[in-house]
Amino acid sequence: MASREDLYEEAVRTHGAALDRLARAYEFNPDKRLDLLQDIHLALWRSLASFDGRCSLRTWIYRVGHNVATSHVVSDRRGRSQHLLSIDEVDVADTSGDAEESAERSVAMDRLMSLIHELKPLDRQLVLLFLEGVDAAAIGEITGISAGNVATRIHRIKKILTTRFQGGARS
Amino acid sequence: MTNDSDFKFCEMWQQGSGEPPRFTPEELRGRITRFERTIKRRNLREYLAAALVVGIFGYYTWVFPTLLLRIGCGLIIAGTAYVIYQLHRRGSTRSAPEDMGLRSCVEFQRSELARQRHALSTVWSWYLLPFLPGMVVFLLGLFEFTMQVSEAAGRRFPIGAAIAGFGLVAGCIGLVFFVIWLMNRRAAKNLQAEIDSLDRLTRDPA
């Protein structure tokens, strides 16, 4: 088994960018985002001492990242009393802008980020893992959500993304 | 999840995010130090507040003329010491558990919610109740002392008015306790609803 330092190096090399995107999706404020990212790296580094290969390193990294970020959202939400939505509560059709505008990538990304920030932690995890290209079985393993529920929710996520952001994804 | 449109969404999400920040071991160690400093500051604030309460009621124990008042002050001091011990033991700001990668997101979130629900549903017994004996004895002592002073001055305080006055104070304290209990119960119920909805996600729909 590789040392903790080696595992951490590998984690940063293979998933550093994904963790950065994860932090962006959980925190708008740049200073707080950097703090959150540092917390994720710290938790990852500490946790790798008990990594025993029972799951893949990718599953481990995403679990730590999302668990730390969820704790951050929950404690931050307590202060702001923001009501977060479940994926079932999100309108499939976008009402905040037109499809032509969404065709521009930067606009589409901003709106996608706004949509993600409105979601409850578990739905946020699902959307982010889907966007990172993680397959349904691995999403189930990382999140602990049953295969049937993953399939139902991914289907809805795809429907929302296709309706709202088809143009941005094409450009 | 491998069709062309899905791939394009993933590509849009992943492209152009730039070089992610890297953290040196020194920066991560600095983060631990800052975290520990925050905990120390919080503990210090709690100890100072407790020292203030103990100081004030310790002084009262010395200067108050009746045994009942002194016992009340002593019980409030004991209650404060117990609450501080419990706050220290249950400290809510914790570093991330090392087994975080072993638990799925649902398991982790569920255990965090269950921990908060437990803290809320037991807050009555460790945060409010320890002050109650001291407050009751202190109020009775105050009542006894008021009657003694008014009698010594030759102007007997109307017993009905005295009972009504102290009853009002006791009622206000009781109301505050009741409202806190009610709010905590509601918050614990909301947390339980969140836990139930997480549990539903781990089972396939029938």
Image (cartoon, rainbow, N blue to C red):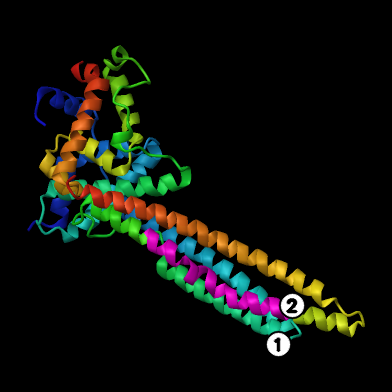
Does residue B178 show up? yes
Q: Is residue B175 above or below residue A80?
A: below
* Label total for image: 2
Residue A106, given in percent of the width and then of the height, sits at: 30, 21
Q: Tell me which residue sits at (21%, 22%) in the image.
A: A162
Q: Chain of mark 1?
A: B
Q: Chain of mark 2?
A: B
Left or right: where does residue B164 sit relative to residue B58?
Answer: right
Mark nearest the camera among 2 and 1 is 2
Circle 2 packing at 10 Å, graded few (<14), some (14-19), many (20+), is some
Q: Amino acid at mark 2?
A: Leu
Q: Marks 2 and 1, Cα distance to the nearest angstrom?
A: 11 Å
Give me the disc on residue B45.
none
Residue A88, given in percent of the width and then of the height, sits at: 29, 35
Q: Which residue is mark 1?
A: B67
Q: Which residue is mark 2?
A: B142
Secondary structure beneath dot 2 equals: helix
Q: Quadrant of the N terminus of chain B?
A: top left
